[in-house]
Each structure stands twice: as structure tokens, then as C-alpha cells.
Image (cartoon, grey):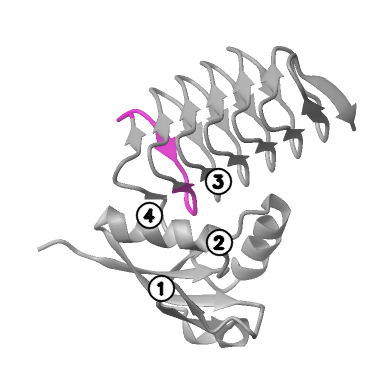
Amino acid sequence: MKNIKKVNLYGASGHAKVVIDCILSNGCYEVNQLFDDNKNIKDLVGFSVLETTKLKDSLQNDFIVSIGDNKIRSNIVESLSLNHTFCNFIDHKTSYLASSVFIDKGTVIMPKAVVNSDSKIGKHVIINTASAIDHDCIIEDFCHISPNATLAGGVYVGTGTHIGIGAQIIPGIKIGSWATIGAGAVIIEDVANGATVVGNPGKVIKR
């Protein structure tokens, strides 16, 4: 008989809906409780939402921080980590993960995402719907790889960086920490820490 683990979610927004779907499809986990700072949110897709003042009552179950904003997710993880533990990664049943892939705690792999051979995914990362990460990529903690983004082989993405919807990154590119890659951008050169890059080919518009 399969051992079903219970998981709590911190964050009851649209992103949390997709995380819930991943949990329900996975077969290894079930949703225990949802928590949110917004006291007006009482329900999300049929699950009750509790105020975060009640977090102290849920020490026995692991958490996923189900918030899309990288910086907010990072801050909440930091605040929770003193008293709570985090779930091993969650993947949707339609995603593909090569057997040599390493994925750290708190990360969620959304429907139809692909992570290929020898790639390494850090903590509390979002690999969103139908994104593709090819071989030997490294995605550091708190990144968000948006829907339909494509990373070719050997790409490095620094902590907290957001890769926009449909962005394309050629092989061997290094993207710094807390950078933003715009939707549909084509990245053919390395990107510095904190830079915002848009367009085809990608151009820095903000540092």
C-alpha cells in the first residue's frame, strides 16, 4: 500500500491552484491545509484556507510555499524555516524528469514540463507548464521558469531569476541572480546579476 504524505501550502492564489493540481495528480501526496496572509480568503478550489496565525498548529506536516513571486517566496521560506520543514519536490504526472536529474526541496514541476539529463534544480523553484530544460542545466534556488520557456543545454540560472513566458536561451549561457528575462526574449549572451533583458536578440533595459 502506497504511503501518502500530507503537505501544507502557504499561499492561496492562482499559482496555488496549479500546485494543488500537481499534488492531486502525483499520487504520493495529499493536501493537508492551506494558509494565507489574506484573512478574506476562506476557500480555494474546495479547500479551506486558514490564517497564518494558525501555522504553529501544523508543525507535523511539510510545506510547499505556493507563491509565484520569487522574492516573496524567498522571504516566506526564510520565515518558515526556523519552525517548519519543506516537502520534497512535487511533479505533475504529465511532466518528464530524466533519471539523472537532481531536484531540491520545495520545488514544483508543472504539467508537461521537461527536465533532461544531469540537470540540477535548486530549492523552491517553479518549473512552469510546458517549459523545457535541456541537459546539464543548473537552476539555483527561488527561480521561476515560466510556461513554454526553453533552456538549451548547459544553461546556468542564478538565484531568484525569473525567465519569462516563451523565452529562449541558447546553449552555455550564464544568467546572474535576481535577473528578469522578458516574455519571448531570445538570450544569446550572458546576463549580469539583477539585469532585465527583453527582445530578440535580448537587450538589457534595466540593471
User: Is residue 32 positioned above or below 53 on the image?
Assistant: above
Q: Do residues under tags 2 and 4 come within 8 Å of each other at their CB atoms?
A: no
Q: Position of residue 36 (x, y in %)?
A: 60, 76
Nearer mark to the viewer, of 3 and 1: 3
Q: How many marks?
A: 4
Residue 168 appears in the rendering: yes
Give 127 or 166, whichever is nearer the viewer.
166
Q: Which mark sits nearer the N-terminus, 2 or 4? A: 2
Q: Give the label on residue 14, or none.
A: 2
Q: Which mark sits nearer the N-terminus, 1 or 2? A: 2
Q: Give the label on residue 125, or none.
A: 3
Q: Give the label on residue 22, or none.
A: 4
User: Is residue 72 positioned above or below 132 on the image?
Assistant: below
The local secondary structure at tag 2 comes to helix
Report the residue marked by disc 1.
Answer: 61
Q: Residue at x 81, y 25 (%)?
A: 192
Nearer mark to the viewer, of 4 and 1: 4
The local secondary structure at tag 1 comes to loop
- Mark 4, Cα crowd under 10 Å, few <14 / some 14-19 / many 20+, is many
- Disc 4 marks which amino acid? Cys
Give 32 or 85, whichever is nearer the viewer.
32
Q: Do residues under tags 2 and 3 come within 8 Å of each other at their CB atoms?
A: no
Is 23 on the left or on the right of 186, as rendered?
A: left
Nearer mark to the viewer, of 1 and 2: 2
- Mark 3, Cα crowd under 10 Å, few <14 / some 14-19 / many 20+, is many
Q: CA distance from mark 4 to mark 1?
A: 18 Å
Q: CA distance from mark 1 to mark 2?
A: 22 Å
The magenta stretch is: 98-108
- Disc 3 marks which amino acid? Val
Q: CA distance from mark 4 to mark 3?
A: 14 Å
Q: Do residues under tags 4 and 1 come within 8 Å of each other at their CB atoms?
A: no
